[in-house]
Amino acid sequence: MPTDAHPPAGPAHAREFPFAAGTGAVSVAFAAHRRAPVTGDHIDLFIGSAATPPPDPDARVARTFRLATSAFAEGAPFPGIVDAVELEPHRAEYLSLERPRELSDGRGNVEPLRRETGVAAVHDDRLELHCGAWSAFAERVDSARWRFAFRLVEGGRSTCPSSSNR
């Protein structure tokens, strides 16, 4: 039976969008992870390719970042800067999670907060997300840590700038 606890990332993940450089449509989900014994309460941000949904909900294809609970408020990412830790890829099912679920081995529970599609530009050390009424720009701090800057977009949907824009 598969577990959620830091699965090994297969070599294919490093070559596929959104793990490798590229621009494309993404599925994005935020979930509150509560009662996590080691890391405490936090928000998980899941990003997966919307172009090729995985046939297997257990496929480890969701790029995952752990954010502070302060990064999300009133149903949306909170504008501002927040540090994040990139985790091992999580299962595809988190991109479409509809109900809270208890995790195995006493690792707490996960409650879906928001799901949507958008556009992402992935670079070696940068990530840009544009989803409806918000955007995020992230830069790698070191091998696992990132710094995200979330902002609200006035007037609705934004578009992802080309990779040469930054």
Image: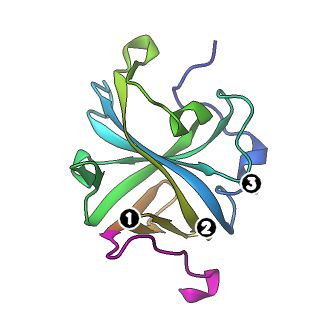
**What secondary structure is found at the residue carrying circle 1?**
strand
Can residue 45 be seen by looking at this rendering?
no
Residue span colored magenta: 151-166
Q: Which mark is residue 38?
A: none
Q: Is 32 placed above or below 119 here? A: above
| Point 30% across, 24% down: residue | 37
Per the image, the residue denoted by label 2 is 122
Per the image, the residue denoted by label 1 is 147
Frontmost of labels 2 and 1 is 2
The disc, 2 or 3, on the residue closer to the chain's N-terminal end is 3
Q: Is residue 108 left or right of residue 96?
A: left
State the image quarter where residue 109 is shown: top left
Label 2 – label 3 distance at C-alpha: 11 Å
**What secondary structure is found at the residue carrying circle 2?**
strand
**What secondary structure is found at the residue carrying circle 3?**
loop
Q: Amino acid at mark 1?
A: Arg
Place of residue 31 in the rendered image (x, y in percent of width and height, measured from the top left): 38, 38
In this orientation, which residue lies closer to the viewer: 115 or 84?
115
